[in-house]
Image (tube, coloured by chain):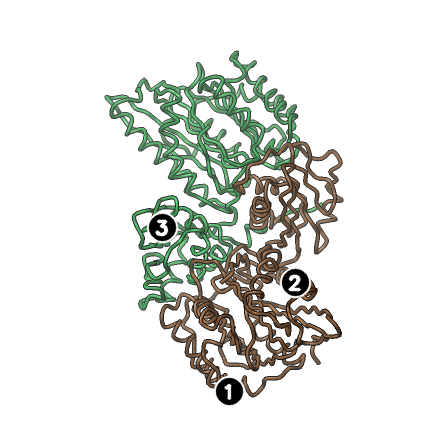
Chain colours: A brown, B green
């Protein structure tokens, strides 16, 4: 039985196998195939250091004009900072998949996630391809196998679904994601968070890209676990067209809403399963001079070790919020700032709110999820940003090393 | 017996008392007096949210043209985000000191450090002033009492000394500092790190400011513990003139060197005593297009949770260094980057250095102190930046809260 209970988009098949790349011995190669090819749009990390599959995947989308027949993902090795041999290894793995499916190799979209700087054991990856092909299928169990094999330090499966109907035809959108650390994405069109979105809508690559950008901006680009932007972040949207619903008329806003819903759900799931996370905090910054300035303040609070450690113990030490906002590089006057935590008054008119109740605020912060609202009192700029606390468990996960 | 064994600058007296502001009951009010007044220059935090004593101290230096008769410091309360009442409280404490010494109140320089957002118990501070006056003295024990009372989460006394001779006359420079958390200073002329520098050189305020700025840029502005810039950071340089050596001729470079030496020593001591620190890491970034870009990369690595947690276990996971550098907002080509750790080869020509030795690198990183050198291969821009690891102890210190 699969945990996926919703219908899947038509036109896709999924599988996973154990190739021995993950030290744990768990499934580590995932394959998704769209017979006949899908229209594709992708967004990638804006890091100056990018993994080989990001370089190759970006190039493939350009040469094919946004056409993908299969997605090959390995976990356990990022194939990053591996030089030209890394590019060669990635290309060889694409060729191996193309040979199995009789398509051109640049219709294969590669992804890798795991440790940086270690040569990819490409022979293991290539050897796994025939078995992965043999296991392909379109059931919820198959989709779950794909979504599971891409995980690394994640503790939970991250999947989301949305659908809508147009003239008795149903369009399905299925998304899956991995990522629990090195999460501070800032994806640009052309983000080790990996997100795959599969739909049976009929749309061309350009239109998919135009719809993907705003959905990513408000979701994956508005979350942070540790603020460390990865070298491998990738969001890939594939459209098989098999619903026979075209992306025009009322199908466009319906799909945009479905896309936003699935991206929001997966982005939240990534933070909720973040390394060592015990509290998920939504930062609502309003009253800024621009949305960009609001996000800059949100991102600074979200990456402040003092704010994040205070959240871990539900400590209403709100002065740390103000100190972090004040170093964000955004000009403001503390006298016009208002802060509430979980809806409770904290700071107003340049000083502690007269109604501040330390015990009540501590109780609100003891919930797993709550919202911190900071209004700058300047203008209409705003940002909604989802982040988390910094705990002993985060340190343990990321400091775990023995010779 | 004092741990301070060097001669102190002439013209200053110091003391400390317990005023009951620190919850621990330890000495929490420090007083330094320069009879007849000292020339002064200061640098403060560039945070948008600043504590009342920063606002008041800045104003006092302007109105007096850079003249300070006494420095009043309290630990245990930052007097920040306390609105107009906080400004009033600060001003009242200055008046109380001025009355004791028969000087104008704007010749009193105030400082506070501790929790943000809690009203300063100014009546305790004022009540402590007469006792602080009665205990003033110019011995090493007195200077140590001052340097001890300003500490908060610090575990060690932080003092430094330098001296030089000009025509049989000796100029002494004594500095003390506090700070272990919320350390990511970016001080601007006119930085909860507090630094007090006392000298008996004869120099006017403008000349002191001109000499202080480059010394601070290369020291306190080039360190980070948690990257959280404080609302109270202050560096104050006082010159009594009592050495009868004027700041001209060969005395200028001699004093500049002494000042740089004391600032470097205190900046290192702050990181070495940083909250939970087990490794002190010097980042040498070279080959950048500008010093500013080099420092931007250094600061991004220094505040990367993934780099800092890896350092805590001496984990040679150097890919995290590259990933952090790559998100610093500085354009570079990984193919021209070279990385060494403790002098050992790690990364070159776009990939892991052929001579990379994981065990040797782990051994080098097991030292309490070592240097990571990253050369961008672009131009001559460089930065030397001192930072530290992120440990369980840091989380414990900053998450410690109970209702």
| Residue A150 visible to the viewer | yes
Q: How far apart are the two marked residues, 2 and 3, measured between alpha carbons?
A: 45 Å
Residue at x 48%, y 85% (from the top left corner): A102
Check disc 2 and report the residue beneath it.
Answer: A256
Q: Quick check: do tags 1 and 3 share a chain? A: no
Q: Residue furthest front?
A: A249
Label 2 SS: helix
Residue at x 69%, y 47% (from the top left corner): B402
Residue at x 49%, y 30% (from the top left corner): B145
Q: Which dot, 2 or 3, sits closer to the camera? A: 2
Q: Position of residue A61 (x, y in %)?
A: 48, 70
Check disc 1 and report the residue beneath it.
Answer: A130
Instruction: Identify whether B334 is placed above or below B124.
Output: below
Q: Chain of mark 2?
A: A
Check contact, mark 2 vs mark 1: CB within 8 A.
no
Check disc 3 and report the residue beneath it.
Answer: B285
Check contact, mark 1 vs mark 3: CB within 8 A.
no
Judge by depth and name the residue closer to the eye, B144 or A302.
A302
Q: Position of residue A278 (x, y in %)?
A: 66, 57
Closer to the N terminus: mark 2 or mark 1?
Answer: 1
Residue B86: mark in rendering: none
Q: Chain of mark 1?
A: A
Q: Residue furthest top?
A: B102
Quarter of the image where one finds residue A93: bottom left
Left or right of B237, for residue B355: left
Q: Quadrant of the C terminus of chain B?
A: top right
Q: Residue furthest left?
A: B167
Q: How far apart are the two marked residues, 2 and 1, measured between alpha carbons?
A: 36 Å
């Amino acid at each position: 039985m699969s945990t996926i209970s919703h219908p899947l988009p038509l036109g896709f098949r999924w599988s996973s196998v154990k190739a021995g790349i993950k030290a744990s011995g768990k499934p580590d190669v995932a394959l998704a195939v769209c017979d006949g090819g899908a229209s594709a749009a992708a967004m990638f990390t804006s890091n100056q250091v990018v993994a080989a599959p990001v370089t190759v995947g970006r190039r493939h989308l350009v040469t094919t004009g946004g056409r993908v027949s299969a997605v090959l993902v390995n976990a356990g090795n990022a194939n990053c900072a591996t030089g030209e041999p890394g590019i060669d290894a990635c290309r060889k793995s694409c060729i191996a998949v193309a040979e199995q499916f009789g398509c051109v190799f640049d219709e294969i979209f590669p992804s890798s996630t795991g440790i940086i700087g270690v040569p990819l054991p490409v022979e293991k990856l290539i050897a796994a391809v025939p078995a992965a092909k043999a296991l392909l299928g379109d059931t919820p169990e198959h989709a779950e196998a794909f979504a599971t094999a891409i995980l690394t330090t994640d503790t939970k499966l991250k999947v989301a679904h949305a659908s809508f109907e147009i003239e008795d035809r149903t369009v399905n959108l299925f998304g899956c994601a991995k990522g629990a650390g090195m999460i501070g994405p800032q994806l640009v069109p052309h983000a080790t968070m990996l997100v795959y979105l599969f739909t049976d809508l009929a749309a061309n690559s350009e239109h998919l890209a135009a719809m993907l950008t705003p959905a990513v901006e408000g979701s994956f680009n508005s979350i942070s676990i540790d603020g460390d932007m990865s070298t491998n972040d990738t969001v890939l949207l594939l459209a098989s067209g098999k619903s026979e619903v075209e992306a025009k008329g009322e199908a466009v806003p319906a799909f945009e809403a479905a896309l936003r819903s699935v991206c929001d759900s997966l982005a939240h799931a990534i933070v909720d399963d973040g390394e060592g996370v015990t509290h998920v905090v939504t930062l609502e910054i309003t009253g800024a001079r621009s949305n960009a300035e609001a996000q800059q303040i949100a991102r600074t609070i979200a990456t402040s070790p003092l704010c994040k450690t205070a959240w871990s113990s539900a400590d209403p030490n709100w002065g740390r919020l103000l100190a972090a906002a004040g170093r964000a590089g955004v000009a403001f006057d503390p006298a016009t700032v208002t802060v509430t935590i979980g809806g409770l008054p904290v700071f107003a008119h340049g000083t502690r709110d007269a109604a501040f109740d330390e015990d009540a605020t501590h109780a609100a912060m003891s919930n797993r999820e709550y919202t911190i609202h900071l209004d700058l009192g300047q203008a209409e700029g705003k940002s909604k940003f989802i982040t988390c606390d910094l705990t002993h468990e985060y340190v343990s996960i990321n400091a775990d090393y023995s010779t």
